[in-house]
Image (tube, coloured by chain):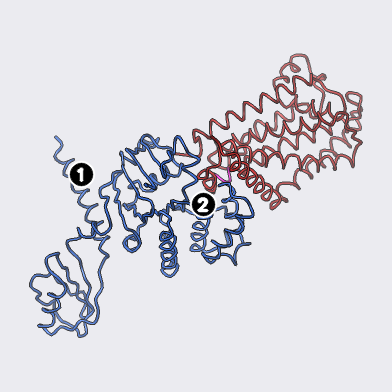
Amino acid sequence: MMNLTLNWIGLKTLVRKEIVRIMRIWIQTIVPPAITMTLYFIIFGNLIGRRIGSMGGFDYMQYIAPGLIMMSVITNSYGNVVSSFFGAKFGRHIEEMLVSPMSNATLIIGHVAGGVFRGMLVGVLVTIVALFFTKLEVQHPLITLSIVILSSTVFALAGFINAVFATKFDDISIVPTFVLTPLTYLGGVFYSISLLPEIWQKVSLANPIIYMVNAFRYGILGIADINITYAYLIVGLFVVGLFSVSLVLLNRGVGIKE
Amino acid sequence: MQALSIKKLTKIYSNGNQALKGIDLDVEAGDFYALLGPNGAGKTTAIGIICSLVNKTSGEVEIFGHSIDRQPEAAKSCIGLVPQEINLNLFDTVLNIVVNQAGYYGIGRKLALQRAQEYLSELKLWDRRFEQARSLSGGMKRRLMIARALIHEPKLLLLDEPTAGVDIEIRRSMWKYLRRINNEGTTIILTTHYLEEAERLCRHVAIIDEGKIIEDAAMTTVLRKVQREVFVLSLGEALTETPELPGFEAQLNDPFELEVAIDAEHDLNNLFAILSRQGIKVASLRNKANRLEELFIRMVEKKQKNNAAAIASTP
């Protein structure tokens, strides 16, 4: 029988530790995404966007803003967990947690909560930056908030799994570079998939980021290329699936125990 | 009550190395227990399994009656670990490290801060509490790992070479502190390469070699097995050649230093009587190696010879 009080205190400790870490190295965790997104808004939204005209009934800057916010949330949630957990493995202070009676589920939730915190914090900052360039009126606040938290959770869990398998620092940059970035760029951040030939529209539907970006865009602008119910279903399945995989890996000691 | 019970514990690593070959070990609550062995003998693997840092291949481990497989939460709550390698988050502050560790054991922040003050003061780290761990000296890092291991007040403390690389003054103050917490009821299992440390602190000793326990007894029983001791005598006056000491094996290291081996059937009184008759003045004497060290080396060497003989006799 799991001791709930013990795990609740353990979880609070872990989340607090993660937040302290994020704020301690704010120059690495908070500032770069804000600068990157500002450049995106200036170059794609302002300079190039003016020539593109409207998309989905909105000017281009307005259209890409939700996608850019979601993109920064996803990459930061992922990046936070993968670097924090792998750093703990590399420095061996993961052992502080492994010897403790705190459950493996708590350990995962704590790290994921840290990733979600950073994702949301960066998301808020990027939203503030976006408001300097365009007008955003949230159409469906609950959908906006829930889908951003769920998407952030999915990528925080993915980052956790990456860190479990990583044995060197190269391993924590391979997935973001070769998987996450292409999926994000092809995930409807900068365009509506209706612009693609039919075959590529179907291929795009295999990309989970399409659902997250579109559901978030629906929450803010009220338009989407996909069915929102499907988006919740897919994102929900990813959360459950990735959490289960993380738990099995941790219970077996994959990548952390000999 | 047994603090630790190990039955038929084996560990085979993925590279095929069999680190533990079915060891049995029982440690009584309140004991101060030494687990000794040469490098690669299996000490750290055994400690890793007890603390759930290493997956065992087979066997049973119970901590105060709690199985590490069936009641891991209860078993882990009883243990505090000071590992061999520094495993601190070097970028975190001293205070955060111990307070966070308390949190992982379900201790609320208010109590954790009180205990942190108590243990960090005890281990002379309170003044450094807001500094990052990376700024501490090697000895301070070791003391911080002890404070971290004690913050949840474990019933069983595992110390894996806690004084490695620590200067003698700090080592002695750590001995004093460990003796005190043992007297207050904490069971301690110590692995060390400083056999003097084990002899001074521990009441029981187990010697592990090549994944097997080759000795497991009270320290006094083990030390009684020492058949021969070597003493180094500082002489009051210089000698030009090694004196004849009937019944003793002697060797003159330099004109002022005489080394004498004494078997169990002889004693120091006998030696001093002979030296006195020969007009040799002794200013002081010391053990060349401590008794446990003598025994340890002999046991490990004997086992290695037996193994070599067994291999040679294999057709």
Q: CA distance from mark 1 to mark 2?
A: 36 Å
In terms of sequence position, does the residue under pointer 1 or pointer 2 come before the other?
2
Residue type, mark 1 in image:
Asn
| Element under disc 2 | loop
Report the residue marked by disc 1: B307
Q: At 14% from the left edge and 34% from the top edge, which residue is drawn?
A: B315
For the question of whether residue B91 can be seen, the reply is: no
Label 2: which residue?
B87
The x and y percentages for residue B168 are 41, 68
Residue at horizontal 20%, vertical 60%? B226
Instruction: Please state the chain letter of the residue tagged with numbered disc 2 in the rendered image.
Output: B
* A29 on left or right of A169: right
**Chain of the residue under the numbered disc 1 shown in the image:** B
Q: Are marks 1 and 2 in contact (CB under 8 Å)?
A: no
- Please, which residue is most extreme toward the top here? A198
Main secondary structure type of the part rendered in magenta:
helix
Region rendered in magenta: A86-90
Quadrant where the C terminus of chain A sits is: top left
When asked about the image quadrant of residue A239, the answer is top right
Quadrant of the rendered image containing residue B176:
bottom left
Task: Please tell me the colour of chain B.
Answer: blue
Camera-near label (1 vs 2) is: 2
Assess disc 2: are there few (<14), some (14-19) or many (≥20) residues with their C-alpha within 10 Å of its C-alpha.
Answer: many
Which sits in the foreground, A42 or A76? A76
Q: Is residue A58 above or below residue A128?
A: above
Determine whether the residue tagged by mark 1 lies in a helix, strand or loop.
helix
Q: Residue at x 12, y 79 (%)?
A: B273
Query: Which of the labelled discs sits on residue B296, or is there none?
Result: none
**Residue B210 falls left or right of residue A250:** left
Q: Is residue B2 visible?
A: yes
